[in-house]
Amino acid sequence: MRAQAKYNASLMSAAGLSDAQKQAAEEKFVEVLEHTFGGGSAVRGAYCEWLAARSLIAENPSQASAPEELQAISRWEQAAEAATRSVFRQLKIGETGAFFELHVWNSRTH
């Protein structure tokens, strides 16, 4: 059994899918990300780095982004897109406009 991570995934805008299909897709998405990044802590870390980099860019759009920020954005977005495609292909979910959201909570409060 997988250790409890400090995050979970939700499949959004997935009209026409049953709750069981959504849950299976969400679990598979997390599984694929954990395989890609090497574990739950690494998924959480990569997501938090992506979120921080995206926030910096949004707050300072005229300022040049550091290479590390761009790398964090690219790394997460490529992995999340690949995981989404993989899950949709494996579970035969068609082009529905559905997407995954990752929800990360503060480790000090949960």
Image: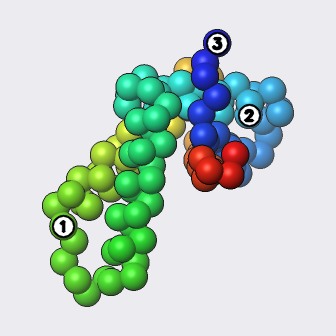
Residue at the location (39% across, 45% down)?
46
Residue at the location (39% across, 56% down)?
50
What amino acid does circle 2 point to?
Lys
Q: Seen in the image, is 39 located left or right of residue 107?
A: left
Residue on which the image places disc 3: 1
Instruction: For marks 2 and 3, give the one nearer the viewer.
Output: 3
Q: In which quarter of the image is residue 17?
A: top right
User: Quick one: label 1, few (<14), some, or many (20+) residues within 10 Å?
Assistant: few
Name the N-terminal-most of marks 3 and 1: 3
Question: Which label sits on residue 66?
Answer: 1
Instruction: For marks 2 and 1, give the one nearer the viewer.
Output: 1
Name the N-terminal-most of marks 2 and 1: 2
Residue on which the image places disc 2: 22
Is 108 above or below relative to 58?
above
Residue at the location (77% across, 46% down)?
15
**Secondary structure of residue under mark 3:** loop
**Secondary structure of residue under mark 1:** loop
Question: Which label sits on residue 40?
Answer: none
